Image (cartoon, helix red, strand yellow):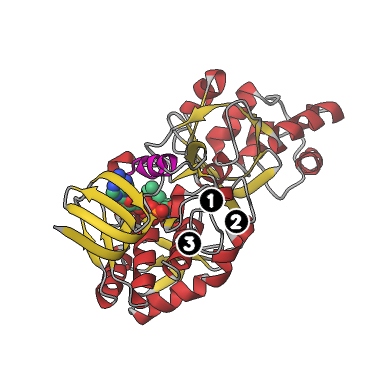
Amino acid sequence: STIRCDVLVIGAGAAGLMTAITAGQRGRHVQVIDHANKIGKKILMSGGGRCNFTNTGTTPANFLSANPHFCKSALARYSPYHFIEMVERHGIAYHEKELGQLFCDVSSKQIVKMLVDECQQAGVQIRTQCSVERIEHGTDGFRVQTTHGLFHCASLVVATGGLSIPSLGATGFGYEIARQFGHQLLPTRAGLVPLTLSGTHQERLAELSGVALPVEASCNGTSFRNFMLLTHRGVSGPAILQISSFWQPGDALSLDLLPGQDAAEWLRQMKRERPAAELRTVLGDVLPKRLAQRLCEHWLPDRPVRQLDEPDLRKAAQVLSAFPLVASGTEGYRTAEVTLGGVDTNEVSSSTLESKRVPGLHFVGEVLDVTGWLGGYNFQWAWASGHAAGCVV
Ligand code: FAD
């Protein structure tokens, strides 16, 4: 027997559930299917279990895409405050951590429960462990053969997310659907991901695993000031995760180890005030001691600061303010928070998220070539794009 509905959403993650809620509230008959045994797994895992569900400072500038204008329309019509209104209506306590990032006080489970409750109120049906076998499109809509039977719908919404963290149910299925219907895909790669180091950098820094410090990481004209964490394999922490989305193999990456300070001026000041002190000692007051020591073993002169002449001093300042980090790669989709690239936005309407090739077909969330920075922006894109599609399907 055929299951008839107005809207079939594939993927019960952030974007799919928001699409379903919005369409259901309009009186549309909505079905949501997911192949996983549980819905919203990434929401549950997110923000260390507290879900950084939005960022109050969200602007289109916080997203990467081959078409930076694409995200504007949906973001403008569904702001962080729309989502906050829902969170407050459900009595979920939250707080701002830093830089506009909002987290649940208690648990990300509350966000999933809120979305499920909203689905229920809107008459949306959700099925888990349901896999798609075949999709056909005709003049009367879509026929989707699944392990739970045949669905016949007027609108089909692809909300299957990106490739990051396969163990949480991520697949490239959305890209397959896009390809089936003649859509272009932009190359995908892991974003918001720790970087691995190579050669001497790896050898010299691996021992410092666990050391954290504020840095300003720069790559291809973009910089982020935040914490960096040294790991066994390389570097992580928010500054590195952010810059990883802008880095590709071979690109130069540099770190300002004294962010917000003029390193040369600081060294001159040290020379005046503490001439007899070793460079590693004065550096150890502003950097983690083990890092200061390691820098003086390999990259900086290991001498009392009074022995640094002006050229030495300028060279040392250059190392401190633009330390060249040689990354060999990323840790890949296993640990990446997002997937860059995806469905080319040029063939999708920015206001309805509908395919320009196939009427009734929509793409929402991370499956599209829209990727947010770290800090709640990716969920805001999922909510906003889901809402935009939900208004028209
Ligand atoms: P998803 O939420 O990934 O949902 C896709 C759904 O589709 C899944 O339920 C999946 O099971 C289903 N699916 C996949 N393939 C198939 C298939 N073949 N058939 C049927 N169903 C399928 N962003 C933030 O803004 N703040 C955070 O704090 C944050 N923390 C994160 C932490 C981690 C560990 C990770 C991995 C990501 C985090 N992100 C965060 C990013 C954010 O989770 C994603 O950008 C967001 O979930 C994307 O929403 P989506 O609905 O497009 O995809």
Which residue is identified by label 3? 385
Q: In the shown orientation, is residue 83 left or right of residue 351? A: left
Check whether the beta carbons of the residues at disc 2 and disc 1 lie within 8 A of each other: yes
Residue sitting at x 39%, y 79%: 88
Check whether the beta carbons of the residues at disc 2 and disc 3 lie within 8 A of each other: no
Q: Residue furthest left?
A: 1
Which residue is identified by label 1? 370
The quarter of the image holding the C terminus is bottom left
In the rendered image, residue 306, in percent from the top left (x then y), is placed at 79, 31
> Relative to 264, is 75 above or below?
below
Q: Residue furthest top?
A: 199
Q: CA distance from mark 2 to mark 3?
A: 11 Å
> Relative to 273, is 154 above or below?
below
The quarter of the image holding the N terminus is bottom left
In the rendered image, residue 156, in percent from the top left (x then y), is placed at 36, 57
In the rendered image, residue 374, in percent from the top left (x then y), is placed at 51, 52
Q: CA distance from mark 2 to mark 1?
A: 8 Å
> Relative to 241, is 305 above or below?
above
Q: Which residues are magenta?
A: 168-180
In the rendered image, residue 215, in percent from the top left (x then y), is placed at 61, 44
Residue sitting at x 62%, y 22%: 298
Label 3 amino acid? Ser
Q: Secondary structure at mark 3?
A: helix
